[in-house]
Image (cartoon, rainbow, N blue to C red):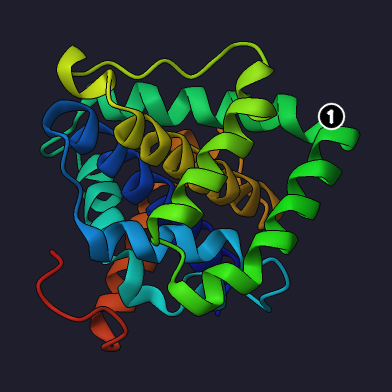
Amino acid sequence: MSEMHDRVLALGGLLQALAQVRRIADTGQSEQGAVAAVLDSVFRLDAEDAAAVYGGPGSVRHGLRLLRDYLSNSNKDEALGKLALAVMQLERRFDREAEMAARVGGEVARLAPQAQRGGSAHPDVVSALGALYAETISTLRPRVMVQGNPHYLGQAGVVAEIRALLLAALRSAVLWRQSGGGMLDFVFRRREMAAAIDALRADGRLPPPLL
């Protein structure tokens, strides 16, 4: 896969995670398939490319659809875009915190066998990932602020899943930067990103429905 394919897959993973953050914050419910795909990526730290990080492009098809809509200026969700920008800014701060990054990596490695046995979306794994986010990344500024229904945001399980998904979103933001992504892509390379998504669909790597 090309570098641009890696970038759009990373952005697809980012948006898929954050779309689930918004969904669960508003309704208390998430789409388990979409959640599992991005939480799995947290544990694939040594994958050879972005496709391997997500277990194949099809796993982030929901996020790629959101990205494709954004690039074509259709069905643009401004709140989701602002949340994505906040995570990208947080990633830049996280990248400068070597000690914190090492701690997060070590804890993820420690949790990996448990995630492999029971699945990355198992409640115990989600709870542990949420606690890890709260103890480390959430201490950085500026914090990522999630708006939603206070009834659900007051539930410990919902908060843990939101934090776990924010960790997954941060992992995708790291992958995006590592693949050469930058904010200027959204100014100068929008058509190229859209073409990369269309190419994935054309060669059958994205199962329908997507676009």
Q: Position of residue 66 (x, y in %)?
A: 23, 48
- Give the structural element (helix, strand or loop) at label 1: loop
Hey, which quadrant is residue 167 in on the image? Answer: top right
**Residue carrying label 1:** 97
Q: Position of residue 49 (x, y in %)?
A: 62, 74
Q: Is residue 44 above or below residue 193?
A: below
Extreme-bottom residue of the structure: 204
Q: Residues within 10 Å of mark 1 (few under 14, many from 20)?
A: few
Q: Is residue 13 visible?
A: yes
Say which residue appears at 66% left-offset and 27% top-offset.
Answer: 135
Q: Nearer the viewer, residue 142 or 192?
A: 142
Hey, which quadrant is residue 152 in on the image? Answer: top left
Q: Is residue 50 visible?
A: no
Say which residue appears at 89% left-offset and 36% top-offset.
Answer: 98
| Position of residue 22 in the picture relative to residue 112 (left or right) | left
Give the amino acid type for the residue marked by disc 1 in the picture. Glu
Say which residue appears at 44% left-offset and 71% top-offset.
Answer: 119
Extreme-right residue of the structure: 99
| Position of residue 8 in the picture relative to residue 77 (left or right) | right
Say which residue appears at 52% left-offset and 30% top-offset.
Answer: 87
Quadrant, the N terminus: bottom right
Q: Nearer the viewer, residue 105 or 197?
A: 105
Q: Position of residue 173 (x, y in %)?
A: 57, 44
